[in-house]
Amino acid sequence: MANIEPITGRYVHLGIEGRAARVYFEEAGQGIPLVCLHTAGADSRQFRHLMLDEEITSRFRVIAFDLPHHGKSNPYVGYQDEDYRLTTEAYDAAIMAFCEALELENPVLMGCSMGGRIVLHMAGAHADYFRAVIGLEASDHQQPWYDTDWLHRPDVHGGEVCAAMISGLVAPQSPDEYRWETLWGYLSSGPGVFKGDLHFYRADSDFRDRTHLIDTTKCAVFLLTGEYDFSCTPKDTLRTATDIPGVEAEIMEEMGHFPMSENPAKFREYILPVLKKVARL
Amino acid sequence: MPKKTVHGGPPAAHAIEHLADAVHADAGLVHRGRYVSLEWLWQIGETPYHINIRDGLIMELVRGPVLMRSFTFAIRGPVESWERFWAPVPKPGWHDLFAMTKDGRASIDGNLQPLMANLRYFKDILAAPRTMEDH
């Protein structure tokens, strides 16, 4: 008998900031909608392990979509003449268009890295809609650690350099199989996509002006960051947490910047207790 | 046989002495560097090492300083940074070149294009002493 996973993948047509987008998403499970946001320059495959975890899918409808330009979501029509740049406004619009199209009721929003950054904005901007947000490797601001111009230029292979730049963000303890699966997302990313996402992450998402306004009695906030993450450091996360009354923040040992994909078994130890709390909200 | 440093990695002198053997023992690493032919400088503490590479192989490794010798780019850091970096399981902050450059524990200068175009290759060379068992 064929070993077929319970994950299903489909396409939904959205309007994002007035532009047509054919967006790919995967899902598994039933119950509280848990919308997952991939990291910059990657795609929804990062969340496949959560979708195969019956302890999660028995209570949550786990859904992950590829932003336009990522994974199996094509770029917008006309991309060939544009410089792709993600903004807070566009990211917010994509998430809301997706959730509304699927008619999700009070979903939980979980994002990693740039996905973790945007959930902090969403917790404030859409507090009545989202039941809770979970920020993985999330902070309201962080110090840049390299020049993103290296990520997209003709004399350096974009996929190879993106993967080699971020390879050290995977913890040394993470299994090789999952380290290299995580890096494949970067190796196979479209040209300029990682750089374009980092426009949001570096230049358009200093949320230090708004995190203190988050009302966690309306939208609960949970933060989980790996100790080996030198991009969004544990310090960045804990500093962010001090500005959000009622937030729960934890540092994950022996974990890097991609917890759900680099070490699924270890991540489970940290995310299950959070999801238990979320289910009780 | 030199002992491990307090941080768990090989002493710098041992690491450099056996660098070429460690790199050449990894056929995949040499293959990934097959388009690399240049001289770069690895500064470990006060000592610069000129490393000449041709087609991914280390052809010459010269302990400096050498007066007026050119190099394409340099990667520099204190002895402690490298010995922590070479630990079998490095601590957070010492586990990656860019973790160290972000925190001022290492630096990079010169013409970075060949480095960035072959980044995995050079990061693997930097990490090669981690695989040295005879320390």
Image: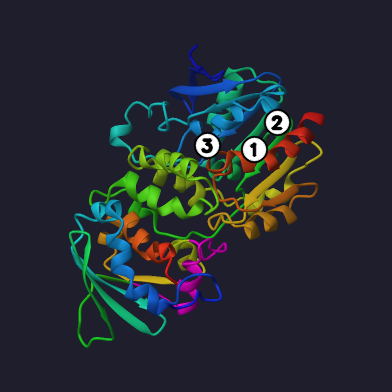
Q: Residue under circle 3?
A: A38
> What amino acid is labelled 2 in the image?
Phe
Say which residue label 1 marks: A122
Seen from the viewer's position, the closer of residues B92 and A145 is: B92
Query: Which residues are the magenta region?
Result: B75-95
The answer to whether A190 is drawn above or below residue A72 in the figure is below
Q: Is residue A14 a member of the stretch shown in magenta?
A: no
In the rendered structure, the residue with mark 3 lies on which chain?
A: A
Circle 1 SS class: helix
Report whether residue B99 is seen.
Answer: yes
Q: Distance between the residues labelled 3 and 1?
A: 15 Å
Of labels 3 and 1, earlier in sequence is: 3
Image quadrant assignment for residue B75: bottom left
> Around disc 1, counting alpha carbons within 10 Å, would you say few (fewer than 14), some (14 to 19), or many (20 or more)?
many
Q: Is mark 3 on a helix, strand or loop?
A: loop
Q: Which amino acid does label 3 sit on?
A: His
Choose the circle earlier in sequence order: 2 or 1: 1
